[in-house]
Image (cartoon, rainbow, N blue to C red):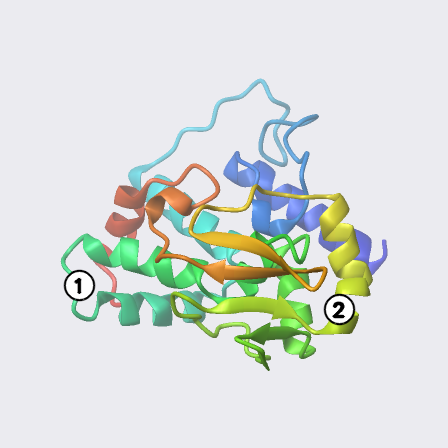
């Protein structure tokens, strides 16, 4: 099995294990033929402990935004500063949705978070007209997100245009400037903008007894 094929299989299994499609993985259809976890035949029902339910919510966030545990904890620490007991989760989502790699994905410039991160790291993405190659950069409200000219003709962008994974969220808008798509951040995203079923209460409980 090639590395590419192995990666695709892994992304399908992740979604089957979580029981939902994770848009950021860029592999739709994981649950169409086998809507049950890997290793099960579909006739058995899993029993969840409270911990497992909370862990699952954390895994959804990690997998969709393509974050390592250490990265997620750093974002949580920053989000908790100056926030109330529960408000930090909303602040966290706002920050994650405004990460540059996620903006590239949500604007439809890339078909997955992984692909978005790659074109950012290659210096193909601009913020307010200047190239930014840091995927974790959190763009402020009002920022304009675009690509360098040759990236609009690249396979990643063209494939994403033909295979739109999600609708453009209402916290950004897309305009046509000189025949090229440009996105603008209109407002700070919130929990409603998480593009999959997400229980913020369980997520909060998971980290309540842990030092992020």
Q: Is residue 110 above or below residue 141?
A: above
Decide: is 81 above or below 170. below
Give how far across and how far down residue 203 sits, in percent. 31, 48
Residue 156 figure quarter: bottom right
Q: Mark 1 or 2, which is nearer the eye?
A: 2
Residue situated in front as seen by the camera: 25 or 94? 94
Give the class, few, some or many, for how many residues have Cα within 10 Å of label 2's Cα (few <14, many ≥20). Answer: some
Residue 107 higher or lower than 41, as above or below: below
Q: Residue at x 62, y 50 (%)?
A: 25
x 30%, y 45%: residue: 200
**Which residue is nearer to you in this view: 120 or 48?**
120
**Does label 1 or label 2 sit earlier along the sequence?**
1
User: Crowdedness of circle 1 by 10 Å Cα count: few (<14), some, many (20+)?
Assistant: few
Residue at horizontal 47%, vertical 74%?
137
Asked where in the image residue 91 lies, by quadrant, the reply is bottom left
Q: Does residue 78 appear to the left or right of 161 in the view shown?
A: left
On residue 73, the disc is none
Residue at (29% x, 72% y) in the render: 78
Residue at which label 2 appears: 151
* 148 sits to left or right of 192: right
**Which structural element holds mark 2?**
helix
Q: Is residue 139 left or right of residue 129?
A: left
Number of numbered markers: 2
> Which residue in the protein does label 1 denote?
83
Query: Does residue 212 appear anywhere in the picture?
Result: no
Q: Give how far across and how far down residue 109 sits, in percent.
A: 66, 58
In front of the other: 170 or 138: 170
Q: Point out the residue furthest to the front here.
A: 178
């Amino acid at each position: 099995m090639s590395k590419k094929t192995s990666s695709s299989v892994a992304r399908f299994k992740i979604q089957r294990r979580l029981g939902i499609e994770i848009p950021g993985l860029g592999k739709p259809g994981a649950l169409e033929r086998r809507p049950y976890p890997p290793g099960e035949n579909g006739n058995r029902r899993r029993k969840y402990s409270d911990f497992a339910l909370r862990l699952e919510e954390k895994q959804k966030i990690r997998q969709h935004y393509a974050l390592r545990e250490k990265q997620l904890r750093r974002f949580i620490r920053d989000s908790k500063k100056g926030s109330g007991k529960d408000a930090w989760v909303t602040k966290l989502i706002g920050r994650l949705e405004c990460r540059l790699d996620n903006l590239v994905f949500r604007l439809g410039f890339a078909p997955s978070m992984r692909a978005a991160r790659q074109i950012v790291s290659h210096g193909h993405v601009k913020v307010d007209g200047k190239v930014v190659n840091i995927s974790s950069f959190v763009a402020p409200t009002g920022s304009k997100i675009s690509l360098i000219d040759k990236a609009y003709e690249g396979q990643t962008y063209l494939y994403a245009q033909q295979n739109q994974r999600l609708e453009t969220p209402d916290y950004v808008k897309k305009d046509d400037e000189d025949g090229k798509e440009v996105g603008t951040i209109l407002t700070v995203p919130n929990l409603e903008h998480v593009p999959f079923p997400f229980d913020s209460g369980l997520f909060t409980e998971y980290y309540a007894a842990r030092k992020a």
